[in-house]
Image: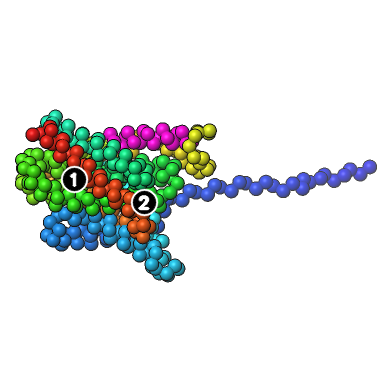
């Protein structure tokens, strides 16, 4: 009986698994157009600010000029160029880079701002001067928030205006913005609206701070304040550091020295204020991410962002960097050349960031919705000046 031939397996040999594709390195080339635009604009704006300084007597900060020019450029590219044209493609290409500058560069500027602050200089104000600062900051922040609710100004706008008016203008608004970006009801839900709120707060700080540059020195003379009192009042009431210098410099050198230290004492309170608000928003984010909470329902993406906001640190990293810079300056180990260079670099970074931030602002929409915030800013200016003056007359006669 013949035997059957041996059968061969018809199973094809198994193919070896293909190697996993290599993860490409992060490509940052898409940021180059926006970074280049911000760099060129910064150089031009710093030069223009120097040319305008004799005319404006130092009242026009280069940060203000950068924000205005950036808003004009962004609005023109975003609204008034034909879609699909060369200018529209340019606007699309620069957006990633300017967004990066508006976030990262601005925070780097806040860190370097700490090198202008020295704890011994602040303590030299004495308990009366420090009390004037604490009272003015606390009352202004609380009052502006309350007035915002009465005027039905959006909560985000009120918080940013309160921070800018009570602490240090653009740097304070930037620090508080980082907290709002982690809130699923503000930055996570409506980033465009948050940019407009930031622009509104910066515009109000600019407008009413500029008015204070001319009004407060005249009022100090009419009231009969001493140079020390005038410097304390201006430092506790005017928003931007450059505005404080411009205002107090018209009184006397002694008033300028007192005003500068008083202003920097207000800046020191930036970290605890941001930490307190950050803790409150983290708690709200945790509640928003909890099933069955009483607040408005969030979709899946909003819940995920709320969870990330709840796990975020109470104090942003760049605020901790700001505190570290303050401590470093307070040691007295840094030479004057380093602190002077850091001050100039801080201005450069802020100008670049303000221009980049301005390019994302919708000026027509901001103009349509700015009436109530404008009233809030006016009332905030009255509050900060009134409380500051009352504290000076009461505690530093």
State whether the magenta stretch is mostly helix, strand or loop. helix
Please identify, in this view, whether the residue under mark 2 or under mark 1 is nearer the observer: 1
Which residue was labeled with disc 1? 238
Which residue was labeled with disc 2? 195
Q: Is residue 326 visible?
A: no
Quarter the C terminus occupies: top left
Q: Is residue 241 above or below residue 356?
A: above
Task: Say whether residue 197 is left or right of residue 119.
Answer: right
Q: Is residue 42 above or below residue 298?
A: below
Residue range of the region highlighted in magenta in the rendering: 272-289
Residue 370 horizontal/vertical position (percent): 33, 53
Q: Nearer the viewer, residue 318 or 274?
A: 274
Q: Nearer the viewer, residue 267 or 225?
A: 225
Callout 1 environment at 10 Å: few (<14), some (14 to 19), or many (20+)?
A: many
Q: Nearer the viewer, residue 336 or 393?
A: 393
Residues at marks 2 and 1 touching, judged by CB atoms closer than 8 Å: no
Q: What residue is drawn where x is 25% and y is 39%?
A: 140
Q: Residue lying farthest front?
A: 150
Callout 2 environment at 10 Å: few (<14), some (14 to 19), or many (20+)?
A: some
Q: What residue is drawn where x is 40% and y is 35%?
A: 282
């Amino acid at each position: 009986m013949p035997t059957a031939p041996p059968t061969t397996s018809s199973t094809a040999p198994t193919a070896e698994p293909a190697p996993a594709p290599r993860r490409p390195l992060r490509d940052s080339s898409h940021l180059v157009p926006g970074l280049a635009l911000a760099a060129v604009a910064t150089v031009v704006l710093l030069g223009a600010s120097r040319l305008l300084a004799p005319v404006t007597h130092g009242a026009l900060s280069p940060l203000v000029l950068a924000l205005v020019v950036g808003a004009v450029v962004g609005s023109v590219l975003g609204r008034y160029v034909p879609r699909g044209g060369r200018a529209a493609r340019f606007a699309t290409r620069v957006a990633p880079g300017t967004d990066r500058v508006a976030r990262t560069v601005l925070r780097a500027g806040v860190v370097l701002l700490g090198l202008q602050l020295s704890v011994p200089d602040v303590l030299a104000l004495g308990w009366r001067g420090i009390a004037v600062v604490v009272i003015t900051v606390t009352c202004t922040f609380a009052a502006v928030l309350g007035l915002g609710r009465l005027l039905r100004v959006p909560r985000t706008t009120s918080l940013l205006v309160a921070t800018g008016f009570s602490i240090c203008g653009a740097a304070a608004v930037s620090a508080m913005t980082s907290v709002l970006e982690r809130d699923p009801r503000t930055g996570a839900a409506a980033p465009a609206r948050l940019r407009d709120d930031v622009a509104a707060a910066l515009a109000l700080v600019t407008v009413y701070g500029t008015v204070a540059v001319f009004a407060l020195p005249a009022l100090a003379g009419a009231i009969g304040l001493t140079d020390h009192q005038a410097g304390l009042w201006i430092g506790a009431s005017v928003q931007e550091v450059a505005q404080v210098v411009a205002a107090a410099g018209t009184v006397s050198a002694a008033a300028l020295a007192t005003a500068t230290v008083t202003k920097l004492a207000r800046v020191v309170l930036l970290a605890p204020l941001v930490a307190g608000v950050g803790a409150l928003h983290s708690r709200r984010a945790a509640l928003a991410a909890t099933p069955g909470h009483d607040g408005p329902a969030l979709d899946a993406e909003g819940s995920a962002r709320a969870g990330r906001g709840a796990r975020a640190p109470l104090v942003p990293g760049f605020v901790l960097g700001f505190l570290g810079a303050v401590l470093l300056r307070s040691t007295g180990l840094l030479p004057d050349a380093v602190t002077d260079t850091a001050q100039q670099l801080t201005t450069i970074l802020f100008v670049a960031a303000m221009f980049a931030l301005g390019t994302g602002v919708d000026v027509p929409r901001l103009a349509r919705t700015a009436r109530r915030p404008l009233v809030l800013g006016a009332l905030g200016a009255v509050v900060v000046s009134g409380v500051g003056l009352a504290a000076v007359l009461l505690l530093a006669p």
